[in-house]
Each structure stands twice: as structure tokens, then as C-alpha cells.
Amino acid sequence: MHNHFIQELQAAIGNRSADRRVTTLRKVTDLFLDQGSRLGLAQIEIFDSLLLGFIGDCDVDVLVELSRKLAPVPFAPVSVVRKLASDLNVTVAGPVLTQSPVLSGDDLLEIATSRGQGHLLAISGRAEIGTALTQALIDLGDRDVLRRVAGNEGAAISRAGLLRLVAASKGDPLLAEKTGLRADLPVRLLHELLDNCAGAVHARLMAKAPTSLRGEIQSRVETIARESKRQAERPRDLRSALALVERLVEKRQLTEDKLLEFAKDRQYETIIAALAAMTGAPIPLIQPLMRIHRHDGLMTACRAADLSWETAKAVILSRLLSLPAAEIEQLRKTYEEVSFSSAKRALYIWQEQTMKPRRAG
């Protein structure tokens, strides 16, 4: 039987009919998968060599089908699998990159360093990934690759790799969640991750973390909340922030994008100075709006500065640990109902009332 399918494969290689070649490939592949576990190494190598010559002219769809069939097979022909894994088309390479047990760490590392993000993403889904390969994925991968690596408990990640994931988690809630749930994440790095992410991530981590980890997360979140409150209530020295904003105004560089940057970085004093400059309102009027828990006054100031909702939302969240999504949506609707002119008028009235000198006696 073995000699028969080898002879049939040899005959098909020389046949110019594409249909005949595909039919023979499927027939021989199925026969190999059925009998392969009983074949000797020499017989598999013969099949490997012949099949390599056969697949060079195959269409993508045929190669994808072959890749899917061979991907989980522990006795799959190594050269054929390597050929499929290094294919530039990730649809062809993906199945074997993710599943094939015959690919070595060196095989995968070579492909990781010479192919694109699609190949890296496929590799990052393997059941087990060694430290060197994982580091390459973290160093070379985009956001999607980092997320898949972080969520893969079979990926062995070095301390340097975990540091990179924690740093990349800032501003990426999904990556923060996946990284925070890793069993191999040291407590110090967990604290750093929690310090850099929003309250919504804290809540998801609490909900999904194992019982042994929830106490640590809860303790750190409470610490963050206390520190946030302390920072919000402490006296503020605005001199450096005012000087920075004055320089930006002189250079005509105080833009909405710049204010959004300040808000995302939670630069409390600079936000106050920038809002005052952009609305024409005095600091003593804007500063209390940042301190109080109500949002309507601060939203009015943001509208008077003609800010988009995204920037206004960032300003509001810059002074808080988090807000429920439903409340944020309600604030958005309220913000969009307020016109620029009415906000300017309200700010002017507040200024007249607040800054008016009190009569003696």
C-alpha cells in the first residue's frame, strides 16, 4: 500500500492536470494520515521529499487545506510543515504555526523574526511557548500579539517580558486585564499595572481573578483611591503650570489636542491653567470646578472652551478613579445639549457672582 501511494504521488507530480494533482494530493494525504502513525522514519522522509516537490505549484486554497490537516499531527512530515509555516500567506502558515508539534523553537523563532504580524499572532496562540520565543513575540508584536501572549498561560514570559506588557498596558484596558490575571505576574508589577489603569479594569480584574488574588487587588485599589483623594484635596501650586500654559499661548500651541494630552496624563494643575486660558476665565473660578464632585460646572467650562466630548470626558476623568459607563453616557448627552454660547454666558455670570468684591458690613 505504501509503495502504491508513493508511485501514485510520483505520477501526479509529472501530470500537468491541476485537478488530477489536487485529487491525488488529497487522496495521498488522507492515506498518510490514516497510516502515518505506523510508518517508519525512512518512509515518512520519502513522503516528505515527494510532497515538497508536489506542493510548489498548488493554489492557496489547496495549501490551506493541507496546512489544516497536518497542523495537529505529531508525525507530520517536517519539511512540508516547515514549508507551509514559512509561507508568506498567513492563511497558509497559520494553522501549522499555531498547532504543529513538529516545529521546533528555532523554526518558530526564525519565522517570528522574518515574517509579519499575522505570523506572530498565529505563533502566539500555541499551547506552549518557550521564553526566548515569547520574548521575540513581545519585542516584535503589535497590540493584538501582545494581548494574545498576555492571555496565553502556556507562554513562558521572562521578567523583562512582563515589564514590557505592564508598560504597554497603560491605555489598553484589555491588555491590562489579560496581564493582570497572569499567575506569574509579580506583586510589584501587579501594583504598577493597577496604578496605571482605570477603575473599570480594576472591577473586571476583581470579578475574574482567582480568590487568592482578589485580596491583593482590593488592597491596592483601596490604596489608589485614598491617594487619589489625598491628591485631589491637597493645596495646589499652579505657578509652573501657569508658566507652561503662558508659553504655549505665546507660541499659539495651546490646542485642544494639547489639553487632551494633559488630561490623559492627569496633569491636574496644567488642566486648570489651560482651561482658564482657553475660556478666558480666572483661575479662582476654574479651580473649584475641578475639585467638587459634581460634573456640571466643569462640563460648562469645557463647553465654553469649545471642546469636543472626548476631550471633555478626559478632563472629567482626570480627577477621578473611574465612572460607570452608564453615567458617562448620560454626561455625554447632557454635554451635547449645552451650546457654546450658553456655556460662555453661564461662565461669565459665575465669574461676576464669584469674583464680585463683597461689601463691608
Image (cartoon, rainbow, N blue to C red):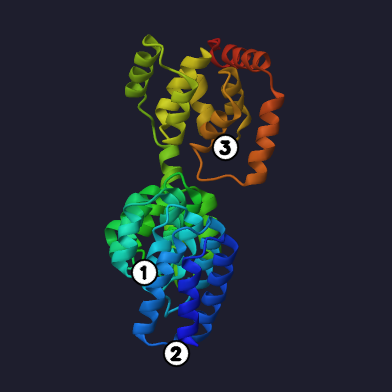
- From this view, report whether residue 10 is shown above or below residue 255: below
Q: Are marks 1 and 3 in contact (CB under 8 Å)?
A: no
Across and down, in percent, residue 107 comes to 32, 65
The C terminus, quarter of image: top right
Towards the viewer: 156 or 298: 156
Q: Marks 1/2: CA distance?
A: 19 Å
Towards the viewer: 2 or 328: 2
- From this view, report whether residue 48 is shown above or below residue 88: below
Residue position for label 3? 293
Q: Quadrant of residue 128?
A: bottom left
Kindly identify the amino acid type of the residue bearing the numbered disc 1: Ser
Across and down, in percent, residue 195 comes to 40, 50
Badge 1: residue crowd in 10 Å (few <14, some 14–19, many ≥20): some
User: Residue placed at 48% from the left, 36% from the top?
Assistant: 318
Across and down, in percent, residue 210 comes to 49, 71
Q: Marks 1/3: CA distance?
A: 66 Å
Q: Marks 2/3: CA distance?
A: 73 Å
Q: Is residue 290 left or right of residue 47?
A: right
User: Residue placed at 46% from the left, 70% from the top?
Assistant: 99
User: Residue placed at 48% from the left, 29% from the top?
Assistant: 260
Badge 2: residue crowd in 10 Å (few <14, some 14–19, many ≥20): few
Kindly identify the amino acid type of the residue bearing the numbered disc 3: His
| Residue 311 visible at all | yes
Kindly identify the amino acid type of the residue bearing the numbered disc 2: Arg
